[in-house]
Image (cartoon, rainbow, N blue to C red):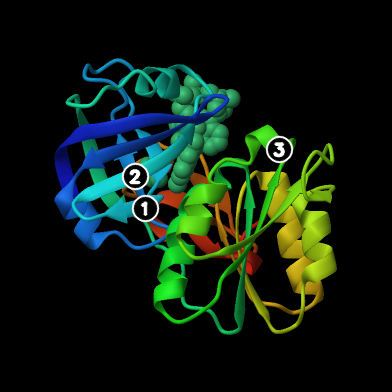
């Protein structure tokens, strides 16, 4: 695990409030596995103090990319980063996706596309033909579709307002296409993950989910990212996840 400075090489606007940040971080790029994340200090100062977690979206040579949405102060500051700025990065952290036991079917909601784009590329390298169901409220928010296509995935989109592709939620689309031979990988809002897990459990299809929780230390020390486990007790998103077997968590 690397902890140190990374030099920003690009920070491109990808749509309303969405950015793709590329930074030179050879040690992170070398070790990163799909589903893992980095903790990033979002400005060149210590304000805000806490580093923010972001999934690794892609590695290109020595560089690491993250796809992020501006939702608050930290991500707003990050959107101002310019090529040449140096940001503190820590990672790769956490546990990533495990290989499929069936035909991989990836389900992405909103920024959930970030870790799945990385995983789609890896699945392709492993000889699979990954299919991705990508959902958003409206067509202008289908961020990351090109990243998925660049990774060799076949992408089917769902928009809640019907502006493109299937008219409805991505979980409604999943309900139509899910087959017993699938192995589902999902990342997106908690409500979406809850429905994905319910659908896959009903059909007894294996399902791995990437979960987000507010984080502080990122290495299992502060207990700030605890999520309830079905078997009782808690699991830590930063140490035990962020990728979990869908059957392990109370969502
Ligand atoms: C493992 C992991 C991977 C992530 N990957 C990505 C990614 O690839 N792209 C991306 O855009 N975001 C990702 N996130 C979420 C990202 O970390 C938060 O959006 C970011 O920390 C918000 O910082 P902020 O200072 O802008 O917002 P804040 O001012 O801290 O918060 C603004 C709003 O966002 C909510 N929020 C803050 N942190 C999180 C969080 N971790 N999960 C859900 N809601 C949160 C707050 O409750 C608040 O409502 C990931 C989170 C985790 C835990
Ligand atoms: S963020 Fe500190 S234990 Fe997970």
Ligand 2 image-quadrant field: top left
Q: State which quarter of the image contains the N terminus.
A: bottom left
Q: Which of 26 and 236 is in front in this view?
A: 26
Disc number for residue 139: 3
Residue at the (53%, 63%) spot, across then down = 244
Question: For mark 1, does the 10 Å Cα neighbourhood hold few (<14), some (14 to 19), or many (20 or more) residues?
Answer: many
**Crowd band around label 2 with a 10 angstrom C-alpha radius: few (<14), some (14–19), many (20+):** many
Tell me the CA gap for discs 2 and 3.
Answer: 23 Å
Q: Residues within 10 Å of mark 3 (few under 14, many from 20)?
A: some
Q: Position of residue 216 (x, y in %)?
A: 37, 35
Residue ID at (23%, 32%) = 8
Q: Is residue 164 above or below residue 196?
A: above
Where is residue 85, by image quadrant?
top left
Question: Comparing marks 3 and 1, which lies closer to the viewer?
Answer: 3
Q: Which of marks 3 and 1 is nearer the N terminus?
A: 1
Q: Are marks 2 and 3 in contact (CB under 8 Å)?
A: no
Q: What separation in Å lies between label 3 and label 1 (alpha carbons)?
A: 23 Å
The percent position of residue 238, horizontal first and vertical second, equals 40, 50
* Residue 241 seen in this snapshot: no
Q: Is mark 3 on a helix, strand or loop?
A: helix
Residue 94, x across and y down, in percent: 36, 56
* Image mark for residue 35: none
Q: Is 100 rendered above or below residue 20?
A: below
Judge depth for marks 2 and 3 and give the one in front.
3
Question: Disc number at residue 58?
Answer: 1
Q: Name the residue under label 2.
A: 65
Q: Which residue is drawn at 40% across and 61% down?
A: 34
Of label 2 and label 3, which has the lower sequence position?
A: 2
Asked if the residue at label 2 sits under 8 Å from ligand 1, the reply is no
Helix, strand or loop status at disc 2 = strand
| C-beta proximity under 8 Å, tags 1 and 2 | yes
Q: Residue 81, located in which quarter of the rendered image?
A: top left
């Amino acid at each position: 695990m690397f902890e140190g400075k990374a030099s920003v090489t690009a920070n491109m606007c990808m749509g309303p409030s969405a950015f793709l940040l590329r930074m030179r971080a050879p040690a992170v790029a070398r070790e990163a596995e799909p589903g893992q994340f980095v903790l990033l200090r979002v400005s060149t100062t210590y304000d805000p103090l806490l580093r923010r977690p972001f999934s690794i979206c892609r590695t290109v040579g020595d560089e690491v990319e993250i796809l992020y949405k501006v939702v608050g102060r930290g991500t707003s500051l990050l959107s101002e980063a310019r090529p040449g700025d140096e940001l503190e990065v820590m990672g790769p952290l956490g546990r990533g996706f495990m290989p499929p036991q069936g035909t991989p079917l990836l389900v992405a909601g909103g920024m959930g596309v970030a870790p799945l784009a990385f995983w789609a590329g890896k699945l392709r390298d492993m000889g699979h033909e990954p299919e991705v169901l990508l959902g958003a409220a409206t067509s202008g928010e289908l961020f990351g579709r090109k990243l998925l296509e660049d990774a060799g995935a076949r992408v089917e989109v769902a928009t809640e307002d019907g502006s493109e592709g299937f008219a409805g939620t991505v979980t409604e689309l999943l309900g139509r296409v899910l087959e017993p031979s699938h192995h589902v990988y999902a990342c997106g809002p908690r409500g979406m993950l809850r429905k994905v897990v319910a659908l896959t459990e009903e059909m007894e299809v294996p399902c791995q989910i990437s979960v987000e929780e507010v984080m502080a230390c990122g290495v299992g020390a502060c207990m700030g990212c605890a999520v309830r486990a079905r078997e009782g007790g808690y699991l830590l998103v930063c140490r035990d996840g962020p990728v979990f077997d869908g059957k392990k968590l109370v969502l």
